[in-house]
Amino acid sequence: MKQKKPWIFILLAVLVLSMLAACGNDKTSGSGEDTLAAIKKRGKLVVGVKYDTRLFGYKDPGSGKVEGFDIDIAKALAKKIFKDENKIELKEVTSKTRVPMLKNGDIDAIVATMTITKERKKEVNFSDVYFEAGQSLLVKKGSSIKNVNSLAGKKVLAVKGSTSVKNIKKAAPKAQVLEFENYTEAFTALKAGKGDALTTDNSILYGMMEENPKYEMAGDKFTDEPYGIAMIKDDTKFTDYVNSFLKELKDSGEYEKIKKKWIKQQ
Amino acid sequence: MPDFSILTDHWDTYIEGFLTTIKASLLALVLSFILGTIIAVMRIAPIAPLRWLGTLFVEFFRNIPLVLILFFCYFALPEVGLPLDGFQAGTIALTIYTASFIAEAIRAGIMAVNTGQMEAGRSSGLTYIQTMRYIILPQAIKIVIPPLGNQFINLVKNTSVLGIVAGLDLMYFGDSISSETYDVFNVYIFVAAFYLVLTVPLSLFVGFLERRLAVTS
């Protein structure tokens, strides 16, 4: 009897795992439903935003308020839906968690410095471009790294789940890429000398430079990163709605105001 | 059923992470066992300052989150001229954290050995250290095998914190594969399977040792 016990355990483990796997596959079947109606019924818009990205989505440690370009865009969307920009709930997402959270129905839309890519379009619906960013490098002033071509053998820091990881591996295949949980940790690692450069969208690097002037951008942007608002796959009604919202925002001049408020260097 | 193409497509990446996890586990296991034993002996030493130091170590490191120790090793130690990479910082943090638990387990084991044993050792001319080393500890270790086994299983699972500081372990590459494939569930199911490959045999081995030692004593 005693020898049989381990097998029962292993069998149980496999059984439980495959059962869990089956549950996991079911969840996405919720896509394609009417997001806009659900938002109106709920009485507030739930948006996934970054909390750690200066200028775009940043939780001020002093005031506790979440502010930035993305936040203002999200609030404008709430205003369009409810005529009240405060009927909104902001949820923190990271590059790693945002798509799973959207698919799980935790959030209605992602406004979190998210680049529109072909692969991501298979997973989510994107709005039209609401911000044109591009990937660049942040280095300590006086660094020998002048642009993306001088990275061979260097350590480059990036953030998990972001497009910048793939881009840098393509642009500088001889560099070693180290991935971190979020921008704060990646920047702290750069300051602690764990790498020679940090790579992500210039929009985010501007915020880091504003916080610590000892760092500068090395070279021009080497990719185009058009940011889009992501929504649940196949809900074209909500996507059309968000696109008409973006067009109105741009036509009314409100968009330029929001942009100037946050992005000073251009 | 899980999608096995994820596993076959990223086999090399999984294995690289798996090997790093094994390496970190083994290193931290040996080091935390040694450190934990030293701390345990300190905690019951006849010299008061040693006892205080041991207690301070245990109560401090046992009662803060492992991630904090890790951040300290990774982000703060470079400031004092100790640049550690993710793997080194992770292994050291794990060693310190696990040692505090192991110290408590071993101390309990030592306390469980009859005090007459120490007195007998001392009166037959052995020093305190010698009695500890040859009489008390061998008996104590037997008593603490089950709790130690639990600590080591926890240790293997806790190596996953390496992923937070780019330690190139199983969890790190799991995150990496998941962001490449946009698949969360299947990727981590295989990560879980790799951890089970390590922890289930460890668990069975601890059970086996327990039965063996029960017979000999």
Image (cartoon, helix red, strand yellow):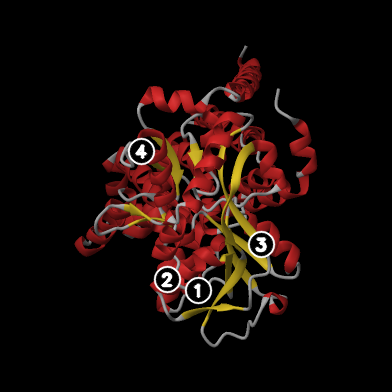
The reply to whether callout 3 and callout 1 are in contact (CB within 8 Å) is no
Q: Quadrant of residue A67?
A: bottom left
Which label belongs to residue B77?
2
Tell me what residue is drawn at x 63 percent, y 58 percent: A225
| Whole-percent x, y for residue A253 in the image | 45, 56
The reply to whether callout 1 and callout 2 are in contact (CB within 8 Å) is yes
Badge 1 or badge 2: first in the primary sequence: 2
Q: Are marks 4 and 2 on the same chain?
A: no
Tell me what residue is drawn at x 57 percent, y 85 percent: A143
Mark 3 residue crowding within 10 angstroms, few (<14) / some (14–19) / many (20+)? some
Which label belongs to residue A224?
3
Q: Are marks 4 and 1 on the same chain?
A: no
Q: Where is A75 relative to A35, above or below?
A: below
Query: Can residue B185 be seen by looking at this rendering?
Result: yes
- Distance in Å between CA atoms under marks 1 and 2: 7 Å
Horizontal arrangement in the rendering, residue A116 relative to residue B4 (left or right): left
Mark 1 residue crowding within 10 angstroms, few (<14) / some (14–19) / many (20+)? some
Mark 4 residue crowding within 10 angstroms, few (<14) / some (14–19) / many (20+)? many
Q: Quadrant of residue A99?
A: top right
- Comparing A10 with A52, the one in front is A52
Q: Which circle, 3 or 1, is nearer the viewer? A: 3
| Whole-percent x, y for residue A83 in the image | 34, 37
Residue designated by label 4: A88
Residue designated by label 1: B83
Q: Secondary structure at mark 4?
A: strand
